[in-house]
Image: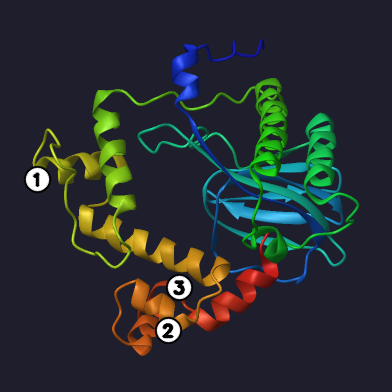
């Protein structure tokens, strides 16, 4: 069966994509032989250079053997890695102006990708020079750049991104197109809600939004199967997960950021939704990030 033709859009549309490079790292997996908690991941890819892994996402479990890549969709997942597993990983966000992910639902699969593996090795070397290993925590640590070094790093990531797109095209994976009118309104609403402070739990509408709160509720129910308040609660939980794993702040500070007056209330709320305390989630999440 012939592969579909690549998506063709005007250059101005492609230029509207917003990119955020999150990390490139290469290291042994710190904790192996156990399943991780359910953690949020961005779009990206990791290569199993040694060992093997298993990914649970979208209701399915995927084996990622040595020499294969796993292409991640931006959502929650759990993972397990065999002892001695070593990964090479890149994380990124790539979104249309309305907040829609470039590859919203097309990823979460494993495949060999030798050209992309080579490009990722080159990216790692470009960013870190002669270093042989960089952990996830080291890769996401804040850093400073001169204008020239920042531009050089952006160019390196852009060159890698071109190979990533070519690889997905060869695998028959098409990016998500900018949304149509009804979906566009939902995506605009979601982008607005996502941009609100995480401490805000009552829903609202963007200024000048062409429909009222009741109709917005109906649209969200139709497209996502949940209402506004449930969306806000899930969003706060997603933000909590991200802060606990990637933020250096204390759990008390995170609780305050999320709108909880007392850390104990935050702990009880988080445990009710996830089954574990924030401190346990932080320990397992950092040790098993991939």
Q: Quadrant of the N terminus?
A: top right
Question: Percent from the top left, x then y, of residue 107?
Answer: 59, 38
Identify the residue position indicated by label 2 in the image: 252
Question: Percent from the top left, x then y, of residue 276?
Answer: 50, 80
Q: Nearer the viewer, mark 1 or mark 2?
A: 2
- Left of 174 or right of it: where is 272? left
Q: Nearer the viewer, mark 3 or mark 2?
A: 2
Determine the residue positioned at 66% across, 68% down: 35
Q: Quadrant of the C terminus?
A: bottom right
Question: Percent from the top left, x then y, of residue 19?
Answer: 53, 37
Determine the residue positioned at 50% across, 14% down: 11
Identify the residue position indicated by label 1 in the image: 214
Distance from Cα at disc 3 to Cα at disc 2 = 18 Å
**Element assignment for label 3:** helix
- Left of 62 or right of it: where is 225? left
Distance from Cα at disc 3 to Cα at disc 1 = 30 Å
Question: CB under 8 Å between callouts 3 and 2?
Answer: no
Question: CB under 8 Å between callouts 3 and 1?
Answer: no
Check disc 2: other Cα within 10 Å, few if <14, some if 14-19, many if 20+: some
Distance from Cα at disc 1 to Cα at disc 2 = 36 Å
Question: Percent from the top left, x then y, of residue 34?
Answer: 71, 71
Question: CB under 8 Å between callouts 1 and 2?
Answer: no
Determine the residue positioned at 32% across, 43% down: 191
Query: Mark 3 or mark 2, which has the lower sequence index?
Result: 2
Of 242 and 157, the residue lying toward us: 157
Query: Mark 1 or mark 2, which has the lower sequence index?
Result: 1
**Element assignment for label 1:** helix
Identify the residue position indicated by label 3 in the image: 274
């Amino acid at each position: 069966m012939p592969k579909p033709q690549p998506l063709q859009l005007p250059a101005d549309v492609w230029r509207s994509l917003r990119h955020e490079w999150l990390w490139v790292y290469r290291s042994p997996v710190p904790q192996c032989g156990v399943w991780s908690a359910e953690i949020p991941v961005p779009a990206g890819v990791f290569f199993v250079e040694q060992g093997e892994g298993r990914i649970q996402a979208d209701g399915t479990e995927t084996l990622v053997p040595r020499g294969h890549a796993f292409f991640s969709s931006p959502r929650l997942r759990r993972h397990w890695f065999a002892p001695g597993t070593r990964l090479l990983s890149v994380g990124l966000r790539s979104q249309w102006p309305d907040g829609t992910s470039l590859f919203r639902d097309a990823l979460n699969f494993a495949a060999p990708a030798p050209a992309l593996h080579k490009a990722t090795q080159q990216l790692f070397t470009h960013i870190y020079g002669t270093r042989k290993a960089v952990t996830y925590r080291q890769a996401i640590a804040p850093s400073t750049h001169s204008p020239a070094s920042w531009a050089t790093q952006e160019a390196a990531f852009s060159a890698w991104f071109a190979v990533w797109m070519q690889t997905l095209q060869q695998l028959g994976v098409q990016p998500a197109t900018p949304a149509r009118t009804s979906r566009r309104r939902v995506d605009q609403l979601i982008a607005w809600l996502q941009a609100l402070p995480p401490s805000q739990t009552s829903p609202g509408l963007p200024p000048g939004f062409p429909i009222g709160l009741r109709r917005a509720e109906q649209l969200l129910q139709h497209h996502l199967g949940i209402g506004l308040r449930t969306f806000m609660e899930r969003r706060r939980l997603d933000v909590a997960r991200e802060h606990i794993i990637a933020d250096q702040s204390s759990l008390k500070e995170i609780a305050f950021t999320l709108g909880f007056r007392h850390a104990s209330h935050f702990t009880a709320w988080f445990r009710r939704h996830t089954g574990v305390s924030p401190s346990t989630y932080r320990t397992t999440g950092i040790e098993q990030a991939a």
